[in-house]
Amino acid sequence: MPKIIGENIDTLCNFQMLPGSGDLTRGETQKFYKAARQAQKDPLTYLAATALAERVKPGDNVLIVTGARNELVLPYGETDGPIGGVALARACYFGLGANSIVTVEESNKEPTEATIRASGLYLREPDMLGKVQGICVLDFYPLGPEAGKQHARWLMDTYNPKAIMFIEKHGPNAKGHFHTVTGREIDMNGMANTQYLLEIAKEQDVVTIGMGDGGNEIGNGVIYDAVREISPWGKKCLCPCNDGIATVSATDIFVATSISNWGAYGICAMLAFLKKDVNIMHDEDTERRMVEACAYFGSVDGIAMIPLPKVDGISIKGGQAFVTLLRELVVNGLSNVARHV
Ligand SMILES: [Zn+2]
């Protein structure tokens, strides 16, 4: 039964709401999904939620890595990423009793803080961990590779997370360069280099989960060869490295999805099913509050590239409808009535 629910949730998370356009990979994400299933066999949200349920115990910490930064167009990041990350933080509290540390570039401070507050979690200082319930700590990941390497070690030593989730977070290609989904280079000195967390997680046997929709985000290393073939910028790019956007950063589990937030919501829904309580995932009102809060403080919609209260071109109503359908899948999965009619 859980695998069937996971299959249905995966299908929903990979539903296409926008046509592909120009050099963007919208419309291609189902090919990424197919490759991810081939590599990992079982439904992706099932794999991710099962790993969380097995590894994370009450009072444990989980680390959520998100946020985009580009001084010109994304000074405050995007709505795709932080909202899904906070939805996961919320589900890890209600479903597993875990506290969360969300790490973003400091430029994403205001929208991420607002999203945490809108989710109903308690935004507190780190010294409150273990003293108060439902805590979400906001951490600022420094820019550049050297500081990134050091901060990865510091985060692991300080918080001892039992799971690390990367959502819509850029990963480097084989030559160490970072790119936008349309093949432009992102200066590694102007962004958080969070990929170093992967090496330490491996050493310490901490499970890592990635969510992505473009081929360039951490986690996509699981389908590296497929991204190079499928994405128009997979193996070539507009920067001097000319090695493409496909990242080598692989996570233990990679959830390919049409919108990164939706992959996160899918994991929340699967966790709600496993733990037999639909309210472990957020509801439609919380969805509206989070999207409004995030955009109000400057995070942009990834299609319009201005702070509209949308996520990758999907309106608040569209996002709420998605949440409604996910919740219905969970409720029907848990209901004896639904199975007998
Ligand atoms: Zn390049």
Image (cartoon, rainbow, N blue to C red):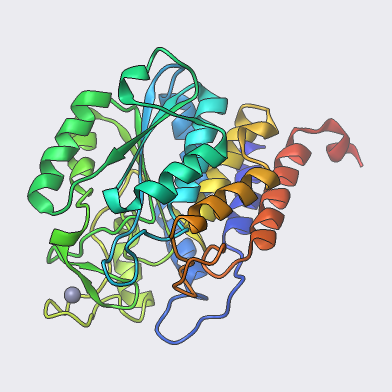
Image point (51%, 81%), residue name? 20
Image quadrant containing the C terminus: top right
In the rendered view, does 293 fall on the left or right side of 218? right
**Residue 45: image x %, image y %?**
52, 45
Q: Residue furthest right?
A: 341
Q: Please, is residue 200 above or below residue 22 in the view?
A: above
Name the spot of residue 194 as percent of width and height, x first.
Answer: 23, 48
Q: How many marks?
A: 0
Residue drawn at point x = 57 percent, y = 80 percent: 19
Q: Residue furthest top?
A: 131
**Left or right, residue 253 beside residue 4:** left
Q: Quadrant of residue 203?
A: top left
Q: Is residue 288 above or below residue 252?
A: below
- Residue drawn at x 47%, y 58% is 79
* Residue 22 in view, yes or no: yes
Residue 257 position, x and y percent, is 50, 59
Q: Position of residue 242 (x, y in %)?
A: 16, 80
Q: Image quadrant of ligand 1?
A: bottom left
